[in-house]
């Protein structure tokens, strides 16, 4: 080993490589993972030297030692680290100690110590040196176990592991090469040199042993290594024969081996080597058909020196250290020689084969049978090893078959010895000591070999032959139709003949042999038949003889009963009745009877029903006699065997009560005697308790059926109480205070007691009647309190701090102390079972206590109980601390030894955590002691990190029947359930403790680290991540999905819960993201699919649930990273989800070099850096199908579901069964309603048992069969419900990811065409799934909501592009998404493999989407209103895509012609899309119309609103008005209009202070929106008027409920947003739609249609008070809603009043017309009176300045909108005045004069001196002066130029955006809220704000110019009248009439001739009022003032405005013409 450049491996060459190799071997051979085979071959080549030099450490090296010693200063190289790393002197000293301790190379020692330091988090409480010791042994163990596994996988003769031929061939070749290097000798030398005591002493000397647990771990590792070495040889020889040298080496080893256990049995290693030798000399292969070919492979046949050498070594070699081993080897060799002698062997072997008798005699002489029975079979591991048992079975059966003469000889010797013994006994002499008892020992060996059969091999069946068909009574006679093999016949003959003429000394051994051979149902039945048939031959071995003898003993002993009860306690074992020999015989017979009864149901019933034998009566009878306790114990055990049949057990209860074995009442014959006296007086004195234990077993079997309710009725209160009191008080509570000769019997007694108590408690059903005292009559008169069920009494005792609970807690405490010693002790297995039952008692109590306590309280009982969790928080008297819970949880740390205890402890902890009272104290208790806390955490971690594969679903109620793997898996699952339950509890919780969060400060401040970093322990979070990460990054994906699917589901659920919890989310997601990259790596493997090699139970439901939790976590990650601006993390995940990937990831991939490799995964492709386009789209040379991962995930969710066929019943009623099933339904932890199958089974079985009568008896099998079908149906229905829930959750998780990706992630990560591609594909896939006719509505319902979201996003994409067009009019880089030119930005890649810019692609995609939406609406009609509402919403979003973008009202819009052409092009594309949309919609005909219209009129409120909106959108594009015609013809329009009045009451309710839900208001708005849309077209407006829309609005009373505006005067109050809008806002929501409808109708029908104006006037007058109130305008401050209200009102009234002719609707002289005119006149006066207030005076200007500049959330500028609203009101008023004036006549002399001739107002700088003008105008008949108009004209012209200059400045900023300073950008983009933005983002916001400002300015300019034009017109008309036509009042009215000019004046613009409303309305007197008071002085003053105030500067400014703004309008020249005429008037007439 070179020194220079040598880098050390921190993982240790002595541990990590071997550990990894072990994992790989396990994966390839036991887990059969296909990927592992190739890796295994490479690893074996790499590790071949390690196998050849097995367990040989690298040699020590002086140079290495010197290098290490200098490492304190010079440092040393470490792999994976830059530079050198210095080591501390302490570290070096420890490394050198390890080097010396294990004779290990110094470098290897340093590596080992470094590995120990790295693994410290796995071993809390240990130092790195102690961990290094464990790693050293663990590495050696891993290597040896790998070798053993490889040898097991060899091709061979004994077994096969089901591996592929290639793998088996490779392993066989490799192991052959290793064997050729002398593996056998190396293993034997290693085994010989491994001495545990010497090893421990050496470790102890160097302080390399830690606490008891560490010592136990080292000991176990050392023993396992030694045993695995021996098993390597055993596995080899089982598969392949050994050669001569290897066999001789085995013999040599065994000769010198004398290793035995303290009990005299062979230790495991010696036993393994012995079995290896026995298999190596086995020649059973000669009995096979193709033996000749196989024999050529066996050295014993091929090698001529093999037999002589082995024979010599066995028979003539050196002395054996253990003669018994020699005897067994000789025994096997003799049989081998006998087998070979029967074959055609050569002459050289004949001489050795002839020695078979001699060798066998030698073996028998050395007591081979005794040795095998006492030393081999008695070994604790023998019956756990199948091939050990088979080998001995083969040896014994071969001996019986192949050497029958020798067997006969042994029998003859046995008979002779029996006669000698009998003769000596008759003479009273002891038997001789030299007598041979070999036949007896043979029978004992057979009994011992077959007595235990834990592996259920039933090898003893070979000893039995079926009875011949001619024999009567044979139930098996017709079963067997074949001739049994000769081997079986010979063995049965041996069994039968061995029982003939049995001498007394062989009787018991023969009975015991039968008992051993009867171990199994079939064997027991054969034995029963044998003993039954023997009865006819007067045999002593028959049932007749057995029970006749027992009857005789009973008759004899019954006469010797004591005469008085006082002497009943005296034990009388009458020697005259039963001798010791007879006692042994009776016990043997009873054991045989018990064995047969236990194993064979039919034999058990036949024995009990036989009237000659009457076994139950006889057994109870002998029990009542004075016989030894041992016999009584066997009698009780035999009765217990009979009680296994329920029908027999029921009678045994009564027999037990009648026999009074346990006295239960005062009339008992034995008084106070019985088992109670036996226990207290006899067994306690003898310190042995066989009878008590047997009685406990008897009760345990009896309680398998319910205790008879009438037990003991008549003599006492019926019930189980006397037995329960005996069990609890006499046995359980006192067992700890009694002395025991055999220490383990103490725990046997406690176990037996708790078995019964636990069963009674577990099976107890809590009922209300148990809490009510009931009295019953007893014999002799009187009553007694009836006994409650035993479970009820046990619950009371368990929920009280009494003796029973204290004893249970004492046992738990004692068990933890004893288990903490980690040393074996007598009765350990019984103690473990005892404490398990204690834990289960607590567990069941915790499960039942809530129901019990609730019923107890409801009943009013006086019984006092306390919750179990509070009792567990009590003080432990042994420790003085409240540590009961800690003691229980400690069992988690013993999970390797007692896994079932760990499961129960976790369940208890989970139940305790559910108590809100106890939970806060739990963490403190668990963490009080630091060492204990570390051990507990380590225990939970170890429980989670077991590698067991889930083989079946774990049933919680059947823990006793679970395998070890199932128990460990259940423990893991329950730990995660515990974490999930406690995670949401207040911190600190148990989950926080287990997951490693901070407990002493806020959980959110935890900084999670990897194990060992900064002292961080290994927590359950690390374990969960380890479990989930196995296999991630490989082709197969996470292994846990297939190996532990339920655990994986819970683990992913835990991760999601941690991410979703507000406290743990931040630290968890930070750790997962930065340290683990967890989510990204796991999402690479979605969608989860079942692996090809997976044979586990991972169902579709589980896979979907696993995927759901992962995707939900991903959605949270996307949301948080986007929120926290972690752009790179967001982009990685989005790329992964949206990129195109291979659909079938299991099919390998294409390497970058173009070669296809099935092992090459797409994960590796990511690492190699394939050239990718945006979102990682790979250019695959193979042309394989690619698909976005997000779509692949959707593909695995099948929306179809097959349901089971309805049940067909013959006996049950279908409805009743469904009701019963419904009554058994419960919600599971996932929230799925499932039927409790066990509860249903119990109910149905009760019905079955209740059947009475002979007819019913015959139907029972048929009813039972029907019950099975019901249960099967329910199980299937449960699974379907779980699958449906899984699919819903999977889709919900997918939806979370999609919606978060599209709505929460930065838009710039997915923009433009790429985003639209994604949306189109998602929409098309979803619509395709919904269109499946087999799709389940339950699954497709949520899809509609997703489609709604996707459509909203799709519409937003188009709107963004359209808004960009409108905002970027000064640029020319815009390309239409619907443009067919195919032009794309040159610097952008092709996105998602689609061609950019294809109009055909997008248009066709849009049409597909539209068709899918419409078809689903049609399919969902008549139901699923939520689905239809979502679909209407999606359809609405779709239709809005084709809406033309509104160009922003900037002045540049009309000036920039190039952009205008772009707009024209865009609109043409949208018009095409709109036309296609309409064609598609119309293609569905009236069906679709009917559905939408029906939903608009009826249905769910939201659905109605959305369907109304859809109608609105469709009518907007329906140019041919097909839909309008349909709606009119079908009456839908009329219905909608009539419904306004119908909803009047509801709408009035909307104006209450506390309204009902506002749905009526929103529906009203939707209706009015649709009606307004109709009113926007002339035909639609005509239809509405025909249907009486205005009349209905006039009749609606809710308009008259306008609230008082005084309480809403506060500035900004009305803008305040609340969940329920205030009353004024609600009122305006009702009013505004009506006003807009009026405006739309009047606009669409034009001024020619007087009817619409008249109807609007009637609507106005009908609610005159309201409009008067609005026009009165008493708001002290400017409020946007109020101004908007006033603006709409003035617009409606102004137009209607100026255009309408209402007198035509009234009859001549109608008084109502006068009233109508009065209302209208008042409204008009109010309207005109607004003019002074809304003149652009200085005070109004100041008010506008005082308005706060506020931008709403939706981007609206409140100040700008208020300004525009004020201008709109002013424009409406002047427009009204202009309309009235212009329609009064074409001539100035007949026009309506609305303003006085005074210009005084124009002289003022402000209107503040005229604040009372409004009230003056309203309250006086005098008109306002013309000065107001002039003032308004001047002010507006001034403001116009100011605003126009502002427009130019902002436009300049927009065009030079890049040149703006940071301060200007910051001001425009929103101030301080944008400080963290980039300059580019800030420019985008500034640009958006500038465009918005320009829009507002453009509207202001337009309104200013409109006001100026109207004011100019009004001024011209009035000046013309006053200066030319007006006659002063003081000159007389007639003069005016006479000299009025008749000529017509030239008009500026022509209009249709119409009668003026005012002209026809007002008489001449009214007209004269207009000019009343106009004197000559007024006219003169006007002539003098006009040139002053209307001077050249004012008119020039107006002309400049015309030049700069007016030229862009259609009224070009209007202002100029008016100015010219005004100039002429002033010049000529002033």
Image (spheres, rainbow, N blue to C red):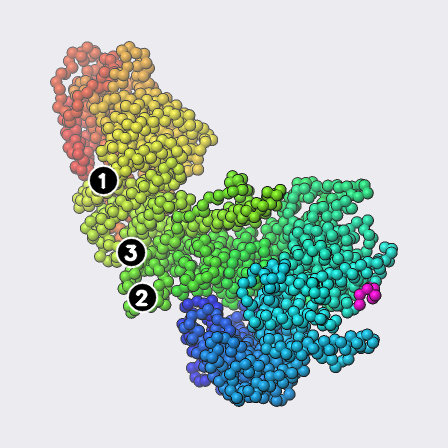
Left or right? Give the position of 1112 relative to 452: left
Please name the residue that numbered disc 2 is placed on: 1150
Please name the residue that numbered disc 1 is placed on: 1475
Which comes sooner in the sequence, label 1 or label 3? 3
Q: Which element is circle 1 on?
A: helix
Q: Residue at x 32, y 17 (%)?
A: 1716
Q: Residue at x 75, y 43 (%)?
A: 785
Q: Residues within 10 Å of mark 3 (few under 14, many from 20)?
A: many
Q: Residues within 10 Å of mark 2 (few under 14, many from 20)?
A: many
Quadrant location, the N terminus: bottom left
Quadrant location, the C terminus: top left
Q: Is residue 577 magenta?
A: yes
Residue nearest the observer in this picture, 1080 or 495: 495
Label 2 and label 3: CA atoms lie apart by: 19 Å
Q: Which element is circle 3 on?
A: loop
Q: Nearer the viewer, mark 2 or mark 1?
A: 2
Please name the residue that numbered disc 3 is placed on: 1392
Q: Is residue 509 magenta?
A: no
Which comes sooner in the sequence, label 2 or label 1? 2
Which comes sooner in the sequence, label 2 or label 3? 2
- Residue 312: x and y in percent read 58, 88
Is 1002 placed above or below 99 here?
above
Residue nearest the observer in this picture, 945 or 1227: 1227
Left or right? Give the position of 101 relative to 1498: right
Q: How many marks?
A: 3
């Amino acid at each position: 080993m070179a020194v220079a450049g040598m880098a050390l491996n921190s993982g240790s060459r002595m541990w990590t490589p071997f550990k990894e190799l072990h994992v790989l071997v396990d994966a390839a051979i036991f887990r059969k993972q296909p990927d592992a085979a190739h890796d295994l071959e490479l690893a074996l080549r790499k590790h071949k030297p390690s196998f050849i030099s097995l367990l040989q450490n690298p040699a020590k090296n002086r140079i290495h030692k010197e290098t290490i010693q200098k490492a304190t200063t010079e440092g040393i190289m470490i792999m994976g680290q830059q530079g050198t790393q210095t080591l501390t002197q302490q570290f070096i000293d420890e490394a050198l100690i390890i080097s010396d301790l294990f004779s290990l190379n110094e470098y290897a020692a340093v590596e080992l110590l470094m590995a120990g330091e790295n693994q410290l988090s796995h071993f809390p409480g240990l130092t790195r040196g102690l961990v290094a010791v464990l790693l050293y042994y663990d590495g050696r163990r891993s290597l040896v176990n790998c070798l053993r596994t490889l040898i097991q996988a060899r091709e061979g003769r004994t077994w096969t592991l089901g591996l592929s031929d290639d793998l088996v061939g490779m392993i066989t070749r490799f192991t052959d090469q290793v064997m050729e290097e002398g593996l056998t000798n190396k293993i034997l030398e290693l085994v010989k040199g491994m001495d545990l005591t010497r090893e421990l002493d050496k470790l102890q000397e160097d302080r390399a042993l830690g606490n008891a647990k560490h010592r136990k771990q080292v000991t176990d590792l050392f023993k396992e290594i030694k045993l695995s070495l021996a098993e390597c040889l055993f596995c080899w020889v089982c598969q392949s024969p050994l050669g001569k040298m290897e066999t001789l080496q085995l013999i040599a080893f065994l000769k010198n081996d004398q290793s035995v256990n303290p009990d005299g049995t062979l230790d495991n290693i010696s036993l393994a080597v012995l079995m290896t030798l026995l298999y190596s000399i086995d020649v059973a292969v000669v009995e096979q058909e193709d033996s000749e070919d196989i024999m050529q492979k066996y050295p014993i046949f091929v090698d001529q020196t093999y037999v002589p050498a082995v024979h010599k070594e066995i028979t003539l070699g050196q002395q054996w250290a253990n003669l018994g081993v020699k005897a067994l080897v000789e025994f096997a060799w003799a049989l081998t020689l006998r087998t070979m002698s029967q074959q055609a062997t050569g002459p050289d072997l004949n001489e050795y084969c002839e020695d078979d008798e001699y060798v066998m005699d030698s073996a028998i002489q050395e007591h081979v049978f005794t040795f095998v029975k006492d030393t081999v079979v008695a070994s604790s591991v023998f019956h756990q090893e199948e091939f050990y048992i088979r080998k001995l079975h083969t040896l014994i059966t071969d001996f019986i078959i192949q050497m029958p003469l020798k067997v006969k000889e042994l029998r003859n010797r046995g008979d002779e010895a029996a006669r000698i013994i009998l003769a000596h006994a008759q003479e009273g002499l002891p038997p001789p000591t030299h007598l041979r008892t070999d036949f007896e020992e043979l029978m004992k060996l057979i009994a011992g070999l077959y007595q235990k059969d834990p592996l259920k091999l039933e090898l003893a069946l070979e000893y039995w032959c079926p009875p011949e068909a001619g024999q009567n009574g044979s139930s098996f006679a017709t079963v067997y139709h074949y001739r049994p093999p000769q081997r079986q016949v010979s063995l049965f003959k041996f069994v039968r003949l061995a029982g003939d003429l049995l001498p007394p000394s062989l009787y018991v051994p023969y009975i015991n042999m039968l008992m051993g051979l009867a171990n199994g149902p079939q064997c027991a039945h054969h034995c029963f038949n044998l003993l039954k048939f023997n009865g006819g031959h007067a045999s002593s071995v028959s049932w007749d003889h057995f029970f006749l003898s027992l009857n005789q003993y009973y008759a004899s002993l019954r006469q010797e009963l004591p005469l008085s009860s006082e002497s009943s306690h005296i034990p009388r074992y009458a020697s005259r009745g039963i001798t010791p020999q007879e006692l042994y015989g009776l016990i043997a017979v009873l054991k045989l009877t018990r064995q047969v009864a236990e194993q064979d149901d039919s034999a058990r019933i036949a024995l009990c029903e036989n009237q000659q034998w009457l076994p139950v009566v006889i057994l109870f009878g002998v029990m009542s006699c004075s016989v030894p306790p041992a016999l009584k114990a066997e009698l009780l055990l035999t009765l217990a065997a009979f009680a296994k049949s329920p029908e027999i057990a029921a009678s045994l209860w009564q027999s037990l009560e009648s026999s009074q074995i346990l006295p239960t009442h005062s009339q008992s014959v034995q008084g106070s005697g019985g088992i109670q006296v036996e226990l207290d007086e006899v067994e306690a004195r003898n310190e042995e308790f066989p009878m008590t234990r047997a009685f406990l077993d008897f009760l345990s079997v009896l309680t398998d059926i319910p205790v008879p309710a009438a037990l003991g009725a008549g003599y006492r209160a019926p019930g189980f109480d006397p037995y329960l009191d005996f069990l609890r008080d006499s046995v359980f509570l006192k067992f700890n205070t009694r002395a025991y000769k055999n220490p383990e019997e103490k725990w046997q007694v406690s176990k037996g007691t708790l078995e019964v108590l636990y069963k009674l408690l577990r099976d107890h059903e809590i009922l209300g009647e148990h809490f009510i005292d009931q009295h019953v009559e007893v014999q002799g008169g009187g009553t007694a309190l009836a006994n409650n069920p035993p479970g009820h009494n046990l619950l009371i005792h368990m929920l009280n701090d009494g003796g029973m609970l204290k004893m249970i807690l004492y046992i738990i405490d004692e068990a933890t102390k004893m288990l903490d010693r980690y040393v074996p002790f007598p009765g350990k297995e019984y103690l473990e079972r005892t404490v398990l039952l204690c834990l289960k008692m607590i567990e069941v109590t915790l499960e039942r206590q809530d129901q019990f306590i609730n019923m107890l309280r409801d009943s009013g009982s006086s019984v006092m109980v306390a919750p179990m969790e509070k009792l567990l928080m009590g003080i432990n008297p042994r420790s003085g601390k409240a540590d009961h819970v800690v003691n229980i949880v400690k069992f988690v740390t013993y999970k390797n030894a007692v896994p079932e205890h760990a499961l129960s402890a976790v369940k208890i902890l989970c139940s305790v955590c559910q108590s809100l009272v106890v939970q806060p104290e739990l963490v403190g208790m668990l963490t009080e002691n630091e060492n204990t806390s570390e051990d507990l955490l380590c225990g939970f971690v170890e429980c989670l990190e077991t590698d067991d594969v889930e083989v079946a679903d774990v049933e919680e109620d059947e823990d006793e029947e679970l395998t070890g793997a199932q128990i460990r898996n259940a423990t893991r699952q329950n730990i995660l359930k515990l974490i999930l339950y406690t995670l949401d509890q207040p911190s600190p919780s148990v989950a926080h403790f287990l997951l490693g969060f901070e407990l002493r400060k806020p959980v959110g401040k935890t900084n999670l680290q990897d194990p060992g970093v900064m002292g961080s322990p290994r927590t359950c979070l690390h374990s969960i991540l380890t479990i989930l990460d196995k296999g991630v990054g490989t082709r197969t994906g996470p292994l846990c999905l297939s190996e532990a699917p339920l655990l994986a589901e819970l683990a992913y659920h835990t991760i999601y819960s941690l991410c979703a919890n507000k406290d743990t989310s931040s630290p968890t997601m930070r750790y997962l993201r930065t340290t683990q990259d967890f989510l990204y790596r796991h999402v690479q493997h979605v969608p989860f699919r079942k692996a090809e090699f997976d044979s586990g139970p991972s169902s579709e439901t589980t896979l979907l649930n696993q995927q759901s939790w992962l995707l939900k976590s991903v959605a949270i990650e996307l949301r948080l990273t986007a929120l926290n601006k972690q752009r790179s993390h967001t982009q990685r995940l989005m790329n992964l989800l949206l990129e195109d990937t291979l659909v079938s990831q299991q099919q390998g991939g294409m390497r970058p070099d173009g070669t296809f490799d099935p092992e090459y995964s797409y994960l590796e492709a990511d690492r190699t850096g394939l050239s990718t386009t945006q979102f990682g789209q790979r250019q695959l040379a193979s042309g394989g199908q690619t698909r976005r991962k997000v779509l692949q995930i959707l593909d695995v969710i099948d929306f179809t579901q097959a349901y089971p066929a309805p049940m067909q019943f013959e006996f049950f009623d279908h409805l009743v069964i469904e009701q019963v099933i419904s009554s058994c339904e419960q919600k599971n932890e996932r929230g799925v309603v499932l039927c409790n199958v066990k509860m249903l089974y119990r109910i149905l079985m009760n019905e079955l048992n209740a059947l009475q009568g002979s007819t019913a008896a015959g139907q029972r099998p048929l009813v039972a069969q029907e019950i099975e079908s019901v249960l099967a149906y329910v199980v299937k229905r449960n699974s379907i419900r779980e699958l449906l829930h899984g699919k819903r959750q999977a889709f919900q998780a997918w939806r979370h990811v999609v919606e978060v990706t599209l709505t929460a992630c930065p838009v710039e990560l997915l923009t433009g065409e790429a985003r639209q591609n994604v949306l189109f594909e998602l929409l098309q896939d979803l619509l395709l799934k919904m269109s499946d006719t087999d799709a389940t509505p339950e699954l497709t319902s949520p899809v509609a909501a997703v489609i709604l979201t996707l459509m909203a996003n799709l519409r937003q994409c188009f709107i963004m592009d359209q808004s960009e067009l409108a905002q970027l009019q000064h640029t020319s880089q815009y390309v239409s998404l619907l443009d067919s030119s195919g032009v794309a930005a040159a610097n952008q890649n092709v996105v998602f493999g689609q061609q950019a810019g294809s109009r055909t692609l997008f248009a066709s995609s849009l049409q597909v989407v539209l068709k899918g939406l419409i078809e689903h609406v049609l399919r969902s009609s008549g139901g699923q209103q939520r689905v239809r509402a979502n679909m209407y919403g999606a359809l609405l979003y779709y239709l809005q895509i084709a809406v033309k973008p509104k160009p922003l009202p900037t002045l540049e819009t009309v000036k920039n012609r190039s952009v205008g052409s772009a707009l024209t092009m865009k609109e043409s594309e949208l018009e095409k899309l709109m036309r296609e949309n309409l064609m598609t919609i119309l293609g569905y005909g009236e069906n679709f119309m009917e559905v939408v219209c029906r939903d608009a009129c009826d249905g769910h409120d939201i659905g109605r609103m959305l369907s109304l909106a859809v109608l609105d959108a469709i009518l907007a594009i329906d140019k041919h008005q097909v839909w309008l015609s349909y709606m009119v013809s079908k009456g839908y329009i009329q219905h909608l209009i009539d419904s306004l009045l119908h909803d009047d009451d509801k709408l009035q309710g909307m104006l209450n202070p506390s309204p009902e839900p506002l749905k009526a208001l929103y529906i009203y708005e939707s209706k009015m929106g649709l009606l307004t849309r109709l009113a926007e077209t002339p035909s639609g407006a005509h239809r509405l008027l025909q249907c009486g829309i205005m009349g209905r609005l006039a009749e609606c009373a809710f308009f008259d409920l306008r609230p008082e505006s005084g309480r809403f005067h506060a500035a900004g109050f009305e803008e305040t947003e609340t969940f329920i809008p205030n009353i004024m806002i609600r009122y305006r929501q009702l009013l505004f739609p009506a006003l807009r409808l009026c405006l739309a109708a009047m606009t669409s029908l034009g001024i020619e249609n007087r009817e619409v104006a008249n109807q609007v006037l009637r609507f106005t007058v009908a609610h005159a008070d309201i409009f008067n109130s609005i026009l009165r305008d008493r708001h002290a401050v400017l409020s946007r809603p109020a101004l908007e209200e006033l603006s709409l009102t003035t617009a409606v009234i102004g137009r209607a009043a100026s255009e309408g002719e209402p007198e035509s609707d009234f009859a001549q002289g109608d008084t109502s017309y006068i009233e109508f005119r009065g209302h209208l006149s008042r409204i008009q006066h109010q309207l005109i009176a607004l003019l002074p207030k809304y003149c652009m005076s200085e005070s109004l200007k100041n008010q506008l300045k005082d308005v706060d500049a506020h931008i709403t959330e939706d981007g609206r500028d409140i100040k700008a909108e208020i300004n525009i609203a004020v201008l709109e009101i002013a424009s409406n008023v002047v427009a009204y005045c202009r309309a009235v004036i212009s329609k009064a006549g074409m001539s100035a002399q007949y026009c309506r004069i609305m303003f006085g001739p005074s210009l005084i107002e124009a002289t003022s700088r402000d209107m503040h001196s005229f604040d009372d003008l409004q009230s003056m105008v309203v309250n006086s008949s005098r008109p306002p002066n013309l000065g107001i108009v002039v003032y308004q004209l001047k002010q507006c012209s001034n403001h116009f130029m100011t605003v126009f200059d502002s427009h130019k400045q902002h436009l300049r900023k927009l065009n030079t955006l890049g040149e703006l300073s940071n301060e200007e950008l910051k001001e425009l983009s929103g101030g301080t809220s944008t400080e963290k933005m980039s300059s580019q983002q800030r420019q985008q916001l500034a640009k958006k704000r500038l465009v918005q400002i320009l829009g507002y300015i453009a509207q202001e300019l337009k309104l200013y110019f409109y006001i100026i034009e109207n004011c100019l017109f009004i001024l011209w008309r009035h000046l013309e009248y006053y200066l030319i036509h007006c006659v002063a009042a003081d000159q007389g009215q007639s003069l005016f009439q006479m000299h009025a000019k008749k000529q017509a004046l030239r008009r500026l613009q022509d209009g249709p001739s119409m009668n003026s409303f005012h002209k026809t309305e007002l008489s001449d007197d009214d007209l004269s009022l207009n000019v009343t008071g106009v004197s000559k002085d007024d006219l003169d003053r006007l002539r003098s003032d006009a040139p002053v105030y209307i001077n050249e500067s004012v008119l020039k400014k107006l002309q400049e405005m015309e030049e700069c703004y007016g030229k862009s309008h259609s009224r070009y020249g209007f202002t100029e013409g008016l100015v010219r005429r005004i100039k002429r008037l002033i010049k000529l007439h002033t």
